[in-house]
Each structure stands twice: as C-alpha cells, then as structure tokens.
Amino acid sequence: MLKRFFITGTDTSVGKTVVSRALLQALASSGKSVA
C-alpha cells in the first residue's frame, strides 16, 4: 500500500526540512523505499 506524508508548518524556519530528513532517514534505515 502506498503511503504518503505531508509535512507542513505555519511559518518559515520551524523545522520542516529537519523533520522531513529525519523521517526519510528512519524509513530508509528500516528498509523502506524512500525514492
């Protein structure tokens, strides 16, 4: 099943990129495809 995540924030510099990268890194390290 295809699952998608939507990372959003209410302002700039609130950590969207940091959260996105951490999520992708965790998924990849558990063997999930992130591409």
Image: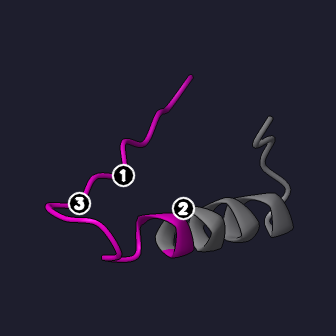
Query: Which residue is denoted by mark 3 in the rendering?
Result: 9
The kind of residue tagged 2 is: Ser
Rendered location of residue 28, percent (x, y): 81, 59
Query: Which residue is denoted by mark 2 in the rendering?
Result: 20
Q: Residue at x 29, y 66 (%)?
A: 12
The kind of residue tagged 1 is: Ile
* In-front residue for pair 11/4: 11
3 inside magenta stretch: yes
Rendered location of residue 23, percent (x, y): 58, 66
Magenta stretch?
Answer: 2-18
The CA distance from mark 3 to mark 2 is 11 Å
Q: Residue at x 52, y 65 (%)?
A: 17
Q: Residue at x 14, y 61 (%)?
A: 10
26 lies left or right of 8: right
Rendered location of residue 14, percent (x, y): 30, 76
* In-front residue for pair 2/21: 21
Above or below, comparing residue 14 to residue 17 in the picture:
below
Above or below, comparing residue 26 to residue 6 in the picture:
below
- Badge 3 marks a residue whose secondary structure is loop
Q: Which mark is residue 17?
A: none
Q: Which mark is residue 7?
A: 1
Tags 1 and 2 in contact by the CB under 8 Å rule?
yes
